[in-house]
Amino acid sequence: MMQVLGNIQDVPPSVTVLEQEVSKVEEFVYLGALIHSPNHSFPDIMRRSAFTRTAMQSLDKQLWRSRILLSTKLRLYNTCILPIFLYGSECWAITKEDARRINALHQWCLSMLLGIKWYHFISNDEVRCQTNQPLLTEIIQARHLTLFGHIALMDDNVDAKQILTSSPSVYWKRPPERPQMTWMKTVQNDLDSHGLSWTDAVDLAQNRPLRRLLATSGATHS
């Protein structure tokens, strides 16, 4: 059965298109990502967090508590665990609360990897120092900027490029119940951390070496 996003309070609950029934749902999974009706990224972030915690716990006795070198554990973590959480993260619109949850998950994973318990009273900064890992939000920021760069390099007649470079009408208003934090606002916050305006970033993206440097710095700056 085909599905389309819509508020469950909307009527009718389904419509017929070309003799095919299309049901209205608040969310569904498409290409591995959870698409939610209000367009919040929070449901997909929490879903990915649950997958990541399950994967970490399944390897606790066999891997994280083993005598394997820390460098090997970190390589496995970055190769096998982080991609579970980061899938589709370049499209997330992240609020401050989302960022707090994301970094808390990262700290929980690193603490498990190091065998650190809450009663050891070891700070988050010390955990990151021992593992030499950036904040997870910085890794996501790099993915945001990489996607931004790809779109900025598209032809001007491509819809995605036009959305990126056009300005909304002065009469435009956000529809009711739509989230205030959007992907474009998230990217703007990422650019602000580099001291770049939206227009400057679009121009910068035309230079591939500089674009790669900008995306890389998103996951390494402090």
Image: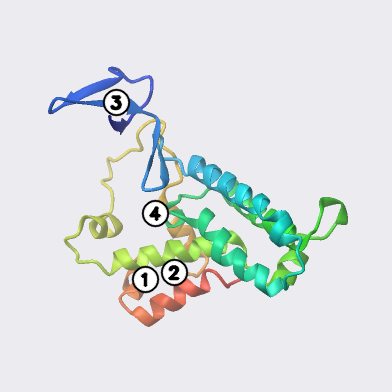
Residue at image location 86% in from the left, 56% down from the top: 121
Measured as percent of width and height from the top left, residue 39 is found at: 40, 40
Marks 3 and 1, how far apart in space? Answer: 43 Å
**Pointer 1 or 4: first along the chain:** 4
Marks 4 and 2, how far apart in space? Answer: 14 Å
Which residue is labeled 1 in the image? 200
Which residue is labeled 3 in the image? 23
Q: Quadrant of the N terminus?
A: top left
Q: Which structural element holds mark 1?
A: helix
Marks 2 and 3, how far apart in space? Answer: 43 Å
Q: CB under 8 Å between callouts 2 and 1?
A: yes
Which amino acid type is marked by label 3?
Ser
Q: Which structural element holds mark 2?
A: loop
Which residue is labeled 2 in the image? 196
In-front residue for pair 158/73: 73
Q: CB under 8 Å between callouts 4 and 2?
A: no
- The vertical placement of 201 against 52, above or below, is below
Which residue is labeled 4 in the image? 184
Measured as percent of width and height from the top left, residue 126 is found at: 77, 66
